[in-house]
Image: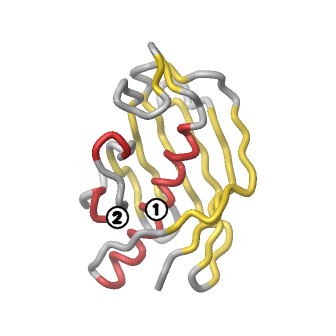
Amino acid sequence: MYDIDIEKLIPHRDRLKLIDEILVADDKRAVTAATVNERWPLYDEDSVNPIILIELTAQTTGIAVGNKRYKETGKGVYGWIVGIKQVKFSVGRIPLGTRLVIRVDPAYDHESYAVFNGTVENASDQKILCSMEIQVFSPE
C-alpha cells in the first residue's frame, strides 16, 4: 500500500471519492483499489452501472498526475479530464462488494497534456471489466 493520503492527490470527497487505497504510484503507473458499495453513484439495489468504471479510471489517473506533481513540489495538484478517446466494457452490472483493481499507464505525455491507458479488473478473478484511453490536461 502506498503511504500518502488519497485526498492530497484528488479533489473528490464523501460519496464521490471512490478509490479506497493506492497500491502503486510511481513515474510509470498508478494502481488503485476500490470496493463497490451502496454509497456509490449509479448504485441500484445490489449492483452499480459499469459507467462508474470511467470515474474510477479518471480518479486513478488523477492520482498518477497528482503524485508526479506531489513528488516535484510537495503539493497536490488536480488534473482535468479532457476526454475519453475510447472505452470498452465487458460487463453489464457490477455486484455490491466486488473489489476492483484499477490500473493506468502513461501512453503519451507532452507538457501539460497526457494520454493514459486504463483497465479495471475484478480482483477475485482478474477479469478485465473495462479498458479505456483517457486524456488529461493538468495545469502548471
Foreground residue, 12 or 60?
Answer: 12
Residue under label 1, please give it. 62
Q: Residue at x 40, y 56 (%)?
A: 24
Q: CA distance from mark 2 to mark 1?
A: 7 Å
Q: Is residue 107 left or right of residue 64?
A: right
Q: Residue at x 69, y 34 (%)?
A: 89
Indicate the position of residue 25 as horizontal and vertical percent values. 41, 61
Q: Quadrant of residue 91?
A: top right
Indicate the position of residue 137 as horizontal and vertical percent values. 57, 73
Q: Is residue 96 left or right of residue 29?
A: left
Q: Are marks 2 and 1 in contact (CB under 8 Å)?
A: yes
Residue under label 2, please give it. 9
Indicate the position of residue 11 as horizontal and vertical percent values. 35, 60
Q: Label 1: few (<14), some or many (≥20) within 10 Å?
A: many
Q: Residue at x 59, y 22 (%)?
A: 93
Foreground residue, 124 or 11?
Answer: 11
* Three-letter residue code for mark 2: Leu
- Badge count: 2
Q: Label 2: few (<14), some or many (≥20) within 10 Å?
A: many
